[in-house]
Amino acid sequence: MKLILAIVQDKDSNRLSNEFVDANVRATKLSTTGGFLKSGNTTFIIGIEDERINEVLEIIKNICQSREQFVTTPVSLDISVDSHMPYPIEVQVGGATVFVMPVDSFHQF
């Protein structure tokens, strides 16, 4: 048995959740916040048998595609630095960060 933690962008979370239901994959869904863009993420916690790991990873890979998005740079409040106006920059968002960890024991009560 393995524990999968999958951190995905909020835009992908509903589709991914539906795919997990269709594939009979039990998942706990948590709302989380990313550090870089300070945008909403969803973290899925999944306990799964070893032989189904590749199936779950493939579902995540197919649903959580990375894409380009424009964000505005923060305004600098440091007066020693040349002031600049915020301007949009293109960054890559989406995709998924996935951790697969061994589980020593599993109990369901």
Image (cartoon, grey):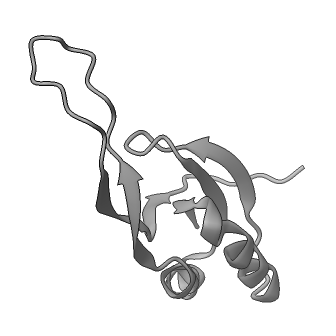
- At 30% from the left and 63% from the top, the residue drawn is 90
Q: Is any part of residue 53 visible from this angle?
A: yes
Residue 81 higher or lower than 61, as above or below: above
Q: On the rendered image, what quadrant is the N terminus found in?
A: bottom right
Asked whether, in this view, residue 91 is left or right of residue 69, the answer is left
Residue 44 higher or lower than 13, as above or below: above
Residue 31 higher or lower than 99, as above or below: above
Tell me where residue 9 sits by quadrant.
Answer: bottom right
- At 73% from the left and 64% from the top, the residue drawn is 27
Instruction: Find residue 86 and report its horizontal and vertical position in percent.
Output: 31, 40
Tell me where residue 85 sits by quadrant.
Answer: top left
Instruction: Find residue 87 and report its horizontal and vertical position in percent.
Output: 30, 48
- At 31% from the left and 42% from the top, the residue drawn is 73
Q: Is any part of residue 5 visible from this angle?
A: no
- At 31% from the left and 62% from the top, the residue drawn is 91
Observer-nearest of 108 and 3: 3
Instruction: Find residue 36 and report its horizontal and vertical position in percent.
Output: 37, 43
Asked whether, in this view, residue 101 is left or right of residue 60, the answer is left
Residue furthest right in the image: 109
